[in-house]
Image (cartoon, rainbow, N blue to C red):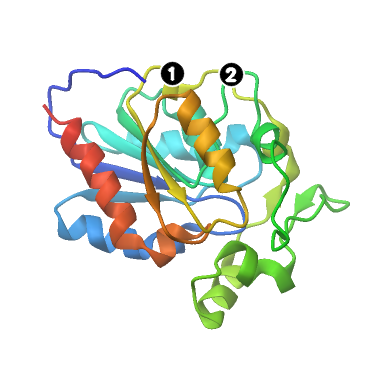
Protein backbone atom coordinates (compact mmCIF):
# COMPACT_ATOMS: atom_id res chain seq x y z
CA UNK A 1 0.00 0.00 0.00
CA UNK A 2 1.30 3.42 -0.92
CA UNK A 3 -0.04 6.76 0.24
CA UNK A 4 -0.66 9.45 -2.33
CA UNK A 5 -1.15 13.18 -1.84
CA UNK A 6 -4.62 14.34 -2.82
CA UNK A 7 -5.40 17.88 -3.94
CA UNK A 8 -9.14 17.64 -3.26
CA UNK A 9 -11.49 16.51 -0.54
CA UNK A 10 -12.76 12.99 -1.21
CA UNK A 11 -16.56 13.23 -1.25
CA UNK A 12 -17.42 10.50 -3.78
CA UNK A 13 -18.05 6.87 -2.90
CA UNK A 14 -18.57 4.13 -5.48
CA UNK A 15 -19.92 0.80 -4.20
CA UNK A 16 -19.57 -2.52 -6.03
CA UNK A 17 -21.63 -5.58 -5.02
CA UNK A 18 -20.52 -9.18 -5.22
CA UNK A 19 -21.92 -12.48 -6.40
CA UNK A 20 -25.28 -13.84 -5.20
CA UNK A 21 -26.44 -10.28 -4.49
CA UNK A 22 -27.22 -6.99 -6.20
CA UNK A 23 -26.76 -3.31 -5.44
CA UNK A 24 -29.90 -3.03 -3.30
CA UNK A 25 -28.02 -4.49 -0.33
CA UNK A 26 -26.05 -1.26 -0.07
CA UNK A 27 -29.10 0.79 0.91
CA UNK A 28 -28.05 1.08 4.56
CA UNK A 29 -24.47 2.01 3.70
CA UNK A 30 -25.77 4.51 1.13
CA UNK A 31 -28.03 6.16 3.69
CA UNK A 32 -25.29 6.35 6.32
CA UNK A 33 -22.82 7.94 3.90
CA UNK A 34 -25.21 10.38 2.22
CA UNK A 35 -26.21 11.69 5.66
CA UNK A 36 -22.54 12.63 6.09
CA UNK A 37 -22.54 14.54 2.82
CA UNK A 38 -20.95 11.96 0.54
CA UNK A 39 -22.10 11.44 -3.03
CA UNK A 40 -22.67 7.71 -3.38
CA UNK A 41 -22.95 5.68 -6.57
CA UNK A 42 -24.03 2.02 -6.46
CA UNK A 43 -22.80 -0.03 -9.41
CA UNK A 44 -25.12 -2.72 -10.79
CA UNK A 45 -22.39 -4.92 -12.20
CA UNK A 46 -23.65 -7.61 -14.59
CA UNK A 47 -21.66 -10.50 -13.06
CA UNK A 48 -21.04 -11.88 -16.56
CA UNK A 49 -17.25 -11.58 -16.60
CA UNK A 50 -14.44 -9.73 -14.85
CA UNK A 51 -14.08 -7.47 -17.89
CA UNK A 52 -17.81 -6.64 -17.96
CA UNK A 53 -17.93 -5.87 -14.25
CA UNK A 54 -14.79 -3.73 -14.50
CA UNK A 55 -16.34 -1.87 -17.44
CA UNK A 56 -19.51 -1.14 -15.46
CA UNK A 57 -17.44 0.09 -12.51
CA UNK A 58 -15.27 2.33 -14.67
CA UNK A 59 -18.38 3.82 -16.27
CA UNK A 60 -19.58 4.78 -12.80
CA UNK A 61 -16.18 6.23 -11.94
CA UNK A 62 -16.25 8.29 -15.13
CA UNK A 63 -19.30 10.14 -13.80
CA UNK A 64 -17.86 11.28 -10.47
CA UNK A 65 -16.51 14.79 -10.18
CA UNK A 66 -13.25 14.45 -8.27
CA UNK A 67 -11.57 11.68 -6.29
CA UNK A 68 -13.54 8.70 -5.04
CA UNK A 69 -13.31 5.80 -2.63
CA UNK A 70 -14.00 2.57 -4.51
CA UNK A 71 -15.44 -0.15 -2.25
CA UNK A 72 -16.27 -3.73 -3.15
CA UNK A 73 -17.91 -6.66 -1.36
CA UNK A 74 -16.94 -10.30 -1.89
CA UNK A 75 -16.47 -10.88 -5.64
CA UNK A 76 -16.59 -7.10 -5.92
CA UNK A 77 -13.13 -7.08 -4.37
CA UNK A 78 -11.70 -8.68 -7.50
CA UNK A 79 -13.57 -6.10 -9.56
CA UNK A 80 -12.18 -3.11 -7.66
CA UNK A 81 -8.71 -4.66 -7.74
CA UNK A 82 -8.78 -4.37 -11.54
CA UNK A 83 -10.97 -1.26 -11.89
CA UNK A 84 -9.21 0.64 -9.10
CA UNK A 85 -6.52 1.90 -11.44
CA UNK A 86 -9.04 4.44 -12.73
CA UNK A 87 -7.60 7.95 -12.21
CA UNK A 88 -10.55 9.05 -10.08
CA UNK A 89 -9.89 6.36 -7.45
CA UNK A 90 -8.21 7.80 -4.36
CA UNK A 91 -8.37 4.60 -2.31
CA UNK A 92 -9.88 1.14 -2.05
CA UNK A 93 -12.06 -0.50 0.60
CA UNK A 94 -12.48 -4.29 0.62
CA UNK A 95 -15.63 -5.49 2.43
CA UNK A 96 -15.23 -9.19 3.26
CA UNK A 97 -13.82 -9.25 -0.24
CA UNK A 98 -11.40 -11.07 -2.47
CA UNK A 99 -8.12 -9.23 -3.00
CA UNK A 100 -6.16 -11.15 -5.64
CA UNK A 101 -2.72 -10.19 -6.90
CA UNK A 102 -1.58 -10.18 -10.50
CA UNK A 103 -2.01 -13.63 -12.00
CA UNK A 104 -4.42 -14.72 -9.24
CA UNK A 105 -8.18 -15.15 -9.46
CA UNK A 106 -10.89 -15.02 -6.81
CA UNK A 107 -10.99 -18.81 -7.00
CA UNK A 108 -7.29 -18.93 -6.11
CA UNK A 109 -8.13 -17.54 -2.69
CA UNK A 110 -11.54 -19.20 -2.29
CA UNK A 111 -9.80 -22.57 -2.46
CA UNK A 112 -7.02 -21.60 -0.06
CA UNK A 113 -8.94 -22.81 3.02
CA UNK A 114 -11.66 -25.41 3.61
CA UNK A 115 -15.21 -24.03 3.20
CA UNK A 116 -17.52 -23.77 6.18
CA UNK A 117 -20.29 -26.39 6.41
CA UNK A 118 -22.81 -23.60 5.83
CA UNK A 119 -21.18 -22.53 2.56
CA UNK A 120 -23.58 -23.13 -0.32
CA UNK A 121 -21.61 -22.15 -3.43
CA UNK A 122 -22.51 -24.73 -6.09
CA UNK A 123 -20.52 -25.85 -9.16
CA UNK A 124 -21.34 -24.06 -12.45
CA UNK A 125 -24.42 -25.37 -14.26
CA UNK A 126 -24.61 -26.24 -17.97
CA UNK A 127 -24.77 -22.51 -18.81
CA UNK A 128 -21.68 -21.74 -16.75
CA UNK A 129 -23.68 -19.96 -14.05
CA UNK A 130 -22.77 -20.44 -10.39
CA UNK A 131 -25.64 -20.49 -7.91
CA UNK A 132 -25.78 -20.53 -4.11
CA UNK A 133 -27.74 -23.40 -2.61
CA UNK A 134 -31.07 -21.83 -1.62
CA UNK A 135 -31.35 -23.96 1.51
CA UNK A 136 -27.93 -22.75 2.69
CA UNK A 137 -28.24 -19.13 1.59
CA UNK A 138 -29.52 -17.73 4.89
CA UNK A 139 -26.98 -19.47 7.16
CA UNK A 140 -24.10 -19.35 4.69
CA UNK A 141 -24.45 -15.86 3.24
CA UNK A 142 -26.36 -13.66 5.65
CA UNK A 143 -26.92 -15.50 8.91
CA UNK A 144 -27.35 -12.30 10.95
CA UNK A 145 -30.29 -11.08 8.86
CA UNK A 146 -33.91 -12.12 9.22
CA UNK A 147 -35.35 -14.93 7.12
CA UNK A 148 -37.41 -12.34 5.26
CA UNK A 149 -34.36 -10.22 4.41
CA UNK A 150 -32.44 -13.31 3.32
CA UNK A 151 -35.32 -14.38 1.10
CA UNK A 152 -35.37 -10.97 -0.60
CA UNK A 153 -31.62 -11.03 -1.18
CA UNK A 154 -31.85 -14.50 -2.69
CA UNK A 155 -34.72 -13.44 -4.95
CA UNK A 156 -32.98 -10.28 -6.17
CA UNK A 157 -29.48 -11.64 -6.84
CA UNK A 158 -27.87 -11.51 -10.26
CA UNK A 159 -26.80 -14.56 -12.26
CA UNK A 160 -23.09 -15.07 -11.53
CA UNK A 161 -21.06 -16.58 -14.34
CA UNK A 162 -18.27 -18.93 -13.28
CA UNK A 163 -15.93 -17.29 -15.77
CA UNK A 164 -15.68 -14.38 -13.31
CA UNK A 165 -14.31 -16.59 -10.57
CA UNK A 166 -11.45 -18.06 -12.62
CA UNK A 167 -10.24 -14.96 -14.50
CA UNK A 168 -6.89 -13.70 -13.17
CA UNK A 169 -6.13 -10.11 -12.28
CA UNK A 170 -3.70 -8.38 -14.63
CA UNK A 171 -3.08 -5.06 -12.81
CA UNK A 172 -3.76 -5.09 -9.06
CA UNK A 173 -4.69 -1.57 -7.98
CA UNK A 174 -3.97 -2.22 -4.30
CA UNK A 175 -0.30 -2.27 -5.22
CA UNK A 176 -0.37 1.48 -5.79
CA UNK A 177 -3.53 2.79 -4.08
CA UNK A 178 -4.15 3.22 -0.33
CA UNK A 179 -6.14 0.21 0.79
CA UNK A 180 -8.54 -0.57 3.63
CA UNK A 181 -10.21 -3.87 4.48
CA UNK A 182 -13.12 -5.13 6.56
CA UNK A 183 -13.01 -8.67 7.94
CA UNK A 184 -16.41 -10.19 8.69
CA UNK A 185 -15.57 -12.36 11.68
CA UNK A 186 -18.66 -14.62 11.34
CA UNK A 187 -18.28 -15.08 7.57
CA UNK A 188 -19.35 -18.53 6.30
CA UNK A 189 -18.82 -17.78 2.60
CA UNK A 190 -15.24 -16.45 2.60
CA UNK A 191 -13.34 -17.88 5.56
CA UNK A 192 -12.23 -14.94 7.77
CA UNK A 193 -8.71 -16.39 7.79
CA UNK A 194 -8.63 -16.06 3.99
CA UNK A 195 -9.53 -12.40 4.42
CA UNK A 196 -6.81 -11.96 7.04
CA UNK A 197 -4.19 -13.63 4.84
CA UNK A 198 -5.01 -11.48 1.81
CA UNK A 199 -5.07 -8.22 3.75
CA UNK A 200 -1.88 -9.02 5.65
CA UNK A 201 0.01 -9.64 2.43
CA UNK A 202 -1.05 -6.30 0.95
CA UNK A 203 -0.50 -4.25 4.14
CA UNK A 204 -4.17 -3.31 4.11
CA UNK A 205 -5.47 -1.24 7.02
CA UNK A 206 -7.88 -3.71 8.63
CA UNK A 207 -11.06 -3.35 10.68
CA UNK A 208 -12.76 -6.46 12.07
CA UNK A 209 -16.55 -6.34 12.37
CA UNK A 210 -18.68 -9.06 13.93
CA UNK A 211 -21.03 -9.99 11.14
CA UNK A 212 -21.90 -12.46 8.41
CA UNK A 213 -20.62 -12.40 4.84
CA UNK A 214 -23.35 -9.81 4.21
CA UNK A 215 -21.84 -7.53 6.86
CA UNK A 216 -22.53 -4.49 4.69
CA UNK A 217 -26.25 -5.25 5.01
CA UNK A 218 -26.32 -6.28 8.68
CA UNK A 219 -23.82 -3.67 9.94
CA UNK A 220 -24.18 -0.76 7.49
CA UNK A 221 -23.20 1.98 9.96
CA UNK A 222 -19.94 0.23 10.85
CA UNK A 223 -19.09 -0.46 7.22
CA UNK A 224 -19.91 3.13 6.30
CA UNK A 225 -17.65 4.34 9.13
CA UNK A 226 -14.66 2.53 7.60
CA UNK A 227 -15.41 4.00 4.17
CA UNK A 228 -15.80 7.49 5.63
CA UNK A 229 -12.55 7.10 7.54
CA UNK A 230 -10.76 6.23 4.31
CA UNK A 231 -12.27 9.29 2.62
CA UNK A 232 -11.17 11.58 5.45
CA UNK A 233 -7.64 10.17 5.62
CA UNK A 234 -7.18 10.54 1.87
CA UNK A 235 -8.47 14.10 1.68
CA UNK A 236 -5.89 16.85 1.38
User: Residue at 21% across / 35% down in the picture?
Assistant: 65
Question: Could you say where residue 45 lies in the image, as x and y percent from the top left?
Answer: 53, 47
User: Residue at 30% across / 57% down in the picture?
Assistant: 222
Is residue 55 something one can see in this rendering? no
Q: Please tell me whether residue 114 is drawn above or below residue 174 in the rendered image.
A: below
Q: In this view, does 210 lie to the left or right of 55?
A: left
Q: Please tell me whether residue 162 is drawn above or below residue 166 in the rendered image.
A: below
User: Residue at 51% across / 61% down in the picture?
Assistant: 212
Tell me which numbered mark, 2 or 1, is placed earlier along the sequence. Answer: 2
Question: Could you say where residue 13 lies in the image, as x and y percent from the top left?
Answer: 29, 44
Q: Are marks 2 and 1 in contact (CB under 8 Å)?
A: yes
Q: Is residue 55 left or right of residue 69?
A: right
The tally of labels here is 2
Image quadrant occupied by the C terminus: top left
Work out how far the residue at label 2 is from the one at label 1, CA to CA, in angstroms: 10 Å
Q: Is residue 144 left or right of residue 107?
A: left
Q: How crowded is mark 1: few (under 14 residues within 10 Å), some or many (20 or more)?
A: some
Front-lying residue, 216 or 192: 192
Q: Residue 102 carries which label?
A: 2
Question: Could you say where residue 153 lies in the image, as x and y percent from the top left?
Answer: 55, 69
Q: Which mark is residue 175?
A: 1
Question: Could you say where residue 85 lies in the image, as x and y percent from the top left?
Answer: 41, 22
Question: The residue tagged with tag 2: helix, strand or loop?
Answer: loop
Image quadrant occupied by the N terminus: top left
Amino acid sequence: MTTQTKSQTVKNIVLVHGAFADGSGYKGVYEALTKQGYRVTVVQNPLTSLADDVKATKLALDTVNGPAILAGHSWGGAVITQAGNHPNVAGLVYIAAFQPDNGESALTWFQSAPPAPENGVLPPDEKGIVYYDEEKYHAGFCGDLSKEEAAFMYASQGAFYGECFVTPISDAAWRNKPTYGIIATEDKSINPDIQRNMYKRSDTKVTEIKGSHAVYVSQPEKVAAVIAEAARELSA
